[in-house]
């Protein structure tokens, strides 16, 4: 173990159905059996930081008083994530409804439930202040994201995975050290897509260039990672030339939670003092391994497997240390 990470975010039970294709508007599709598995961007990232990244990790979140809460807490505790700051509230535990297509692609609708009640009080602020890295996402209220980011210690770092895409107030932008987004989220935040989220940055609305998106976002945050799916990722810091990190070739079974695995392992590596470039290389290996198995938390690899793949000593289909 090395480094301390606090993840403030969502916890959902994933209700998953494999389908021949994602339903179109008004269409009913017959799928396979229903699977209920632990998920939620925050909980996924906490498991990834611990199991896939080897960091001492606390999860700050909220769940209900129902059976779904027990499933989520058991998964977190099995991964050695600290859960003493998870609230039990009088609301249904968050639920994500997920369809998975034969190519591994997914479509997701989330009912936040208890995630709307996540809070940052004195005890949670104190734990955040002990962390090397604070990892945040946007499946919880933006005011909570702001409070969590503001509670970091002076030499700590805030990593924001700005997903799902939503508008961010200036009070959040100023607290972010590293922004992690996919191409669509980057375009939304930088104003690179047509429509109501366009902010007039001068970017071409018909061809979204990842390098241009990064340049625009670096006006707001010190560092940006844009994940590009099969194209890999683009890592950029102010004053440095952007680095393109290629994706690792894999046979995708289920992409659910792969981005969360990436973020959790990235945060864990940063908490141990790794450079952003090196942390992104490890995160790329972790994300590649995650898509080779079904599920979100169930598919998160061990730190040993991540390190082996990143070092080129194994393949994405040859995991050496599956978790219990």
Image (cartoon, grey):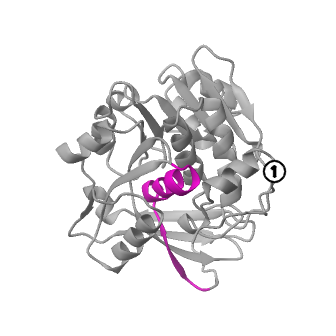
Q: Position of residue 255 (x, y in %)?
A: 65, 61
Q: Badge 1: how crowded within 10 Å, few (<14), some, or many (20+)?
A: few
Quarter location, residue 236: top right
Residue at image position (33%, 60%) is 83
Point out the residue furthest to the front here: 1
**On the rendered image, what quadrant is the C terminus found in?**
bottom right
Image quadrant where residue 208 sits? top right
| Relative depth, front residue between 135 and 113 | 135
Question: 143 above or below 317?
Answer: above
> What's the residue at 36%, 57% (across, down)?
82
**Per the image, is 9 magenta?**
no
- Location of mark 1 (residue): 313
> Relative to 302, does residue 25 appear above or below in the rendering?
below
Residue 199: x %, y % from top left: 49, 27
Q: Position of residue 278 (x, y in %)?
A: 65, 34
The answer to which quarter of the image holds residue 81 is bottom left
- Name which residue lies at 25% across and 46% down: 124
Horizontal side of residue 297 vs 115, given as left or right: right
| Bounds of the magenta segment | 33-54
Say whether residue 205 is visible.
no
Q: Is residue 282 above or below residue 240?
A: below
Q: Is residue 183 left or right of residue 308?
A: left
Callout 1: helix, strand or loop? loop
Tell me the residue at 54%/57% (across/down).
51
Q: Which residue is at the front of the view, 72 or 257?
A: 72
Residue 18 drawn at (x, y percent): 64, 77
């Amino acid at each position: 173990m090395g480094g301390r990470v606090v993840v403030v975010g969502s916890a959902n039970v994933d209700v998953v159905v494999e389908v021949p294709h994602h339903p179109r508007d008004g269409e009913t599709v017959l799928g396979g059996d229903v699977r209920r598995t632990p998920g939620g961007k925050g909980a996924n990232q906490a498991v990834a930081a611990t199991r896939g990244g080897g960091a001492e990790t606390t999860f700050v979140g909220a769940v209900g008083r129902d059976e779904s809460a027990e499933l989520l807490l058991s998964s977190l505790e099995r991964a050695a994530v600290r859960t003493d700051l998870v609230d039990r509230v009088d609301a249904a535990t968050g639920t994500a409804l997920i369809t998975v297509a034969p190519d591994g692609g997914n479509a997701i609708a989330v009912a936040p439930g208890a995630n709307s009640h996540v809070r940052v009080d004195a005890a949670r602020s104190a734990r955040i202040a002990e962390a090397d890295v604070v990892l945040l996402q946007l499946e919880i209220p933006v005011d909570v994201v702001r409070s969590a980011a503001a509670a970091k210690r002076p030499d700590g770092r805030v990593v924001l995975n700005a997903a799902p895409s939503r508008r961010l107030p200036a009070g959040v932008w100023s607290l972010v050290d590293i922004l992690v987004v996919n191409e669509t989220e980057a375009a939304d935040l930088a104003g690179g897509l047509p429509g109501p989220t366009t902010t007039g940055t001068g970017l071409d609305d018909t061809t979204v260039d990842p390098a241009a998106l990064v340049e625009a976002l670096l006006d707001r945050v010190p560092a940006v990672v844009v994940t590009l799916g099969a194209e890999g990722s683009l890592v950029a810091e102010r004053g440095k030339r952007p680095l393109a990190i290629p994706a690792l070739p894999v046979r995708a079974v289920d992409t659910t939670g792969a981005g969360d695995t990436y973020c959790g392992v990235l945060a864990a590596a940063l908490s141990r003092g790794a450079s952003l470039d090196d942390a992104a290389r490890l995160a790329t290996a972790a994300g590649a391994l995650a898509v080779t198995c079904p599920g979100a938390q169930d598919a998160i690899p061990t730190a040993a497997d991540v390190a082996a793949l990143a070092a080129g000593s194994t393949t994405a289909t040859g995991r050496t240390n599956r978790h219990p």
